[in-house]
Image (spheres, grey):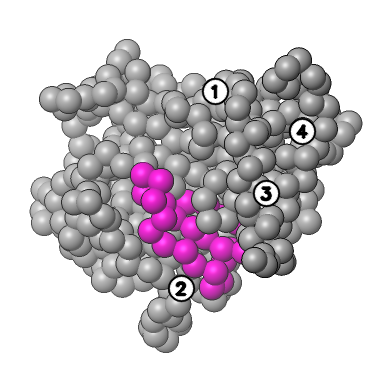
Amino acid sequence: MSFSIRTFLQLTALSAGVIATTDIDLVDDDSCSCYLTNGTAPEYFSDHLFFDFRDLGKYAGVPDPIRNESRSSKADTTSKYFDSEDWNSVWGIQDWSNRNNGGVSLSGDASVLMVNSPNNIYIEKNDDDDAVSDTFLTMRTVHLPGFQSAAEFESANSYQYLSIRMLARVTGSAGACMALFTYYEAKELADIQEADIEILTRDPKDHIQYTNQPSYTDDGDEVPQATRNGSLSDGLGWDDWLVHRLDWTPQRSVWYVDGEEVANIKFQTPKDPALVILNAWSDGGTWSGNMSLHGAAYMQIQWIEMVYNSTDSTSDDKRKRDVEKRPSQRDVGPQGKLVRREGDSDAGCKVVCSIDEAEEAGTNKMLWNSTAPRVMPGGSMGRGLGSLVTWVMGTVVFLYSGFV
C-alpha cells in the first residue's frame, strides 16, 4: 500500500496530536507564546483577547431610545462599563450618520437617515427561561419618526489576520442588518477590503450571508464568487444562541457556526490591516431593507473572543472610519505572519496554546511546550517531543496553506 506525502504527514500529525494532548494544561495568556487554531485553515496567532458580558449585573439597564436625532448621536454611554479602560483600549463606540459630508443627501441608496448612538449599546439582564448567563451586551437599531437609530462599535486597533468568535443571537423586526466584519477603508469601491458576517432580519432565520467584499461593482453588477449565502443546519436559526466564527487568514476567509464550517472563500481575501466592526443598522436601502416605523431589532452578545497576529493603533478622539488613518506596517510581519512579541528575545513560538481545545470560552489549553522536557510514561524525559510536535504541526499548517 502506498501513501502520498500529504496522507503520511496528516496521519503523523494526528498521532502527534494524540501524544501532545495527553497532558494538556489549562494556562493563562502570559504562559502562551502563540495560539494555533483548528479547522480548515489552521493558523498561528500571537495574541488573545476576551470580552465577557455574562456577569455584569451592576451595569445592566435598558435605556429608552432617544427620539431626537442630534441628542441621540451626542448621548452618553449607557453605563460606566463603556467608560472603562479595559473597554476603551480595545473598542470605540460610534456616533456618525449616513449624511454625505454632513449635508442633506444620504450615502448609497439609503432612503432613511441613519444615526449611530451610544445609547443603543448597553448591558441587559438575561431573562430567558433557560438563561445560562446573568447578562449580555445588546446592540439596538430602532426606526423612529424622522430617522433610524443604530449601533456600532469598532476596534481601536487594526489587525492583520485573526480568528474572531462571538456567542450571539439576533431578534426583532425585519429590515435590519446585524454584522461582524473586518474593514479596510479605501476611496475606490474596488479597493475596499472586508470579511463579513451579515444577518438580514428579513431573511429566513437559517440564512446568514458571508462575504469577502466588495461583492458588487461601481456599475451595480454582482460579484458572485465573493459571497456565500450560508444555511444553518439542525433546525438552528440566527435567533438562537450560536457561536459565530470568522477566520481571516492569508489564503482565505472561513466561517463557522457552533464549530461547523458554513462558508469558505479564497476569492479577494483581504490582505491589508483592518479594523474589526460590529453593528446593528438599517437605512431603508436595498441591502438592509426598510424597517417599519417604531420597529426595532437587536443583536445580543454574551462574549467576544479573538486571537490575532499584530495590531497598530488607529484611534483618535472619535475613531471614525477614515482612510487617512490607515495603520502603519511597523509591527506587521511579512504578509501578516506571526511576529515577535515586544520584548521577546526569541521570535520562535515555544509554548503553543489553543482556545479551541479549551472547554470554557476565554480560556487556553497548552498544546505543547518545546522549552521544557516532559516526563514520559515510565519516568523517561521526552526532551524531543516538543520539537517533534512543533515540526509536525508546522508542516500541517504549511500543507493547509497550499504549498504541498
Stretch of the chain drawn in magenta: 246-273
Q: Quadrant of residue 15?
A: top right
Q: Quadrant of residue 223?
A: bottom left
Q: On the image, numbered disc 3 is attached to which residue?
A: 12
Q: Amino acid at mark 3?
A: Thr
Foreground: disc 1 or disc 2: 2
**In the image shown, does 118 or 17 lie closer to the viewer?**
17
Q: Quadrant of residue 350?
A: top right
Earlier in the chain: of badge 4 and badge 1, it is 1
Residue 243 location (% of width, % of height): 37, 42
- At x 60%, y 31%, the residue is 21
Q: On the image, numbered disc 4 is attached to which residue?
A: 386
Let me know if residue 322 appears in the view: no
Assess disc 1: are there few (<14), some (14-19) or many (≥20) residues with their C-alpha within 10 Å of its C-alpha: few
Assess disc 3: are there few (<14), some (14-19) or many (≥20) residues with their C-alpha within 10 Å of its C-alpha: some
Q: Is residue 260 magenta?
A: yes
**In the image shown, does 147 or 56 lie closer to the viewer?**
56
- At x 49%, y 58%, the residue is 254
Residue 386 location (% of width, % of height): 77, 33
Q: On the image, numbered disc 2 is attached to which residue?
A: 226
- At x 71%, y 64%, the residue is 5
Q: Amino acid at mark 4?
A: Gly
Q: Is residue 143 magenta?
A: no
Q: On the image, numbered disc 1 is attached to which residue?
A: 85
Side of 126 relative to 58 (left or right): left
Let me know if residue 224 appears in the view: yes
User: Disc 3 versus disc 1: distance between alpha carbons?
Assistant: 45 Å
Image vertical order of residue 249 relative to residue 140, above or below: below
Side of 309 relative to 74 (left or right): right
Foreground: disc 2 or disc 3: 3
User: Disc 3 versus disc 4: distance between alpha carbons?
Assistant: 14 Å
